[in-house]
Amino acid sequence: MPLPPDRLLRAYRQMKTIREFEERLHVEIQTGEIPGFTHLYSGQEAVAVGVCEHLGDADWIASTHRGHGHCIAKGCDVTGMMLEIYGRRDGLCKGKGGSMHIADMSKGMLGANAIVGGGPPIAVGAAIACKARRDGKVAVAFGGDGSCNQGTVFEAMNLAVVLKAPAIFVFEDNGYSEHTGADYAVGSRDIAGRARGFGMPAETCDGSDFFAVHAAMARALELARNGGGPSTIEAKTTRFFGHFEGDPMLYRAKDEVARHRETMDCLRIFRARVTTEGLLDDAALDAVDAEVMGLIDRSVAAARSAAPPTAADLLTDVYVSY
Amino acid sequence: MRQLSMRDAINEALHLEMARDPRVIVLGEDVSGGAGGTSGQRDAAGGVFGVTKGLLPKFGEDRVIDTPISESAIIGAANGAALAGMRPVAELMFADFLGVCFDQVFNQAAKFRYMFGGKTACPIVIRTATGAGMNMGAQHSQSMYALVTAVPGLKVVVPSNAYDAKGLMLTAIRDDDPVVFFEHKALYPRKCAVPEGDYTIPFGEAALVREGEHVTVVAIGRMVSFAEKALDALAADGITADLIDPRTLSPLDDETIYESLENTGRLVIIDESPPRCSVASDIAALVASNAFHALKAPIVQITSPHTPVPFARELERLYVPSPQAIETAIRRLVKQ
């Protein structure tokens, strides 16, 4: 059953928004206006959107240090995110979190996370809450090939199986945990196989293909929503930038990114398929492109002119009450 | 004498000790980098801050070990290798990641010797990047040395400059006890005169960075340079201080602080970490207990506030104690 055109167009808009958000940050970071370290998601858009296209605000996701894509796919306000990344007072987290800590509970976004492997146990907790409330909602734990080597992730996966929690583990294998290749660091090179070892179904899909991710997520959801417990999706993908902005990527072949932009660009792959199959036309997609560029321009302009936090803000939000 | 950054000084210490002692191994995330990459280039990172650069080509993969992102396994494996006769230097990329592997640090490494009746030792060094000031957010900027200083069995080093860092690192690796070695990110590029070759700085011996008469200033890590800035400004008004850099927090050279207080009678402690159960409050308690008679005025503690480290530039600037705040506090104290 193919997605109706409005949902296809929405998925494209989100992927395009993530792409342009990140490509623009890559440029704006050179100005020195953006504080701290930023990890860009360009190249992996089909994973976040293929998964989150199925979810509503009442479903949960736990994200990673490379979290901008998950945030946008889950419906976080783009301008609010941009302000947060610039460290502004009206940012989604009042400028206190920054790029690695964007969260919005009203959108079911449990937070980006600067600790590799920090998110999956939290997602299992959200899944337990869904199960206890019998609300039919699910929780998704995003992680990379790096996180699949953390003990916390193993514990979370086993716990989810034991409790038959409606949790879905999505591993985005972009080939690198920071500056080290997954070929070296992931012992079996088979993340899905590990998940099966814990006693849950798992499948591997092409993370550059929105439709492949979307279909895998549909199967995982079916299971989770019907009391079948957790499952795992291993999405093979790539990142178009370094581990963080400024990473010279000495561990990657010189032409690798250019090659991947040529062959693994999920936006191009998506556009080719929907136009070939007559699901959407170029005019509609071009209109989305223009709309997205406008949104990113406006959000950058808003972030650049927004006010910073005030001295009083330093001491607030540590506790609910004290 | 040649000038070396703290990054290069620690790097040199690692090179020297690995060459001298075949039991020394280095392990951690990206300590060389490039393993399994597509460029064919190993040593592509040399640690995320470049501190372990060049070790892999010289000492090989058996002794310079790139690990997956698995902090508990990194520190646990360092512990096991130490029990089995090696002298591991494990890198914990950021001190905040102590949260991931704390069992191996405080239940295992810290306690082996005592639990096993003094019949073994666990000579590991945990090198870790510490501190705020680079807008790295709440989970990459903390100063966690008070937490490990509180644990019996662990030794704790917080160097304030490249010279000390090299000498303290050589001592740390040769020390038979587990050592947690905090390297402030903002100090990595800072240079000072560093001699070539081997020298050690003993643990538990504070550095008297400056001598003066009106106040005793105890500063930790990066705060030493902030205190120097404040004291430079105060010198114009004739205010001088003993500036004490403890260098190691466990063991702590409290005697040097008491001796200074006999002359000055006034104490300012500067610590980048939050105030509660901090090294500042620990030193204040020791002084109140052991040198109360020498005090002419209340002890002043200058710390960050009781909050996580904020992200925004404007907030982080307010969070970290500033040279101006130190100057103001000293000015006020000497008038009391």
Image: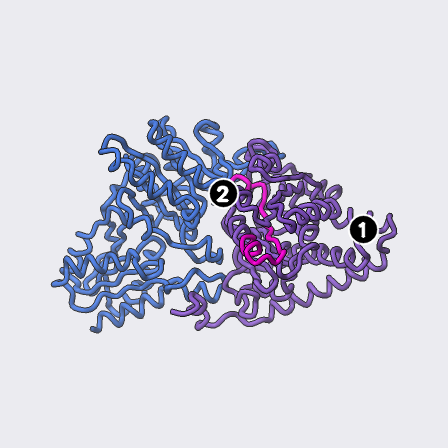
For label 1, the residue is: A2
Chain B drawing hue: blue
Left or right of B294 on screen, residue A28: right
Residue A155's tag is: 2
- Between A305 and A71, the one lying in front of the other is A71
Q: Position of residue B307 (x, y in %)?
A: 40, 63
Please name the amino acid that badge 2 sits on: Glu
Q: State how far apart marks 2 and 1 are (Cα).
A: 36 Å
Is mark 2 in CB contact (under 8 Å) with mark 1? no
Q: Image quarter for residue B34?
A: top right
Count the labels in the image: 2
**What residue lies at 72% left-to-right and 40% top-to-bottom?**
A259
Q: Residue at x 28, y 64 (%)?
A: B301
Q: Is residue B152 left or right of residue A94?
A: left
Number of other residues with Cα within 10 Å of mark 1, as a class: few under 14, some 14 to 19, many 20 or more: few
Residue located at (37% from left, 65% from top): B305
| Quadrant in the picture for the C terminus of chain A | bottom left
Chain where mark 2 sits: A
- Pick the front one: A214 or B156: A214
Q: Which residues are magenta?
A: A126-151
SS state under label 2: helix
Q: How is the image coloured?
A: by chain
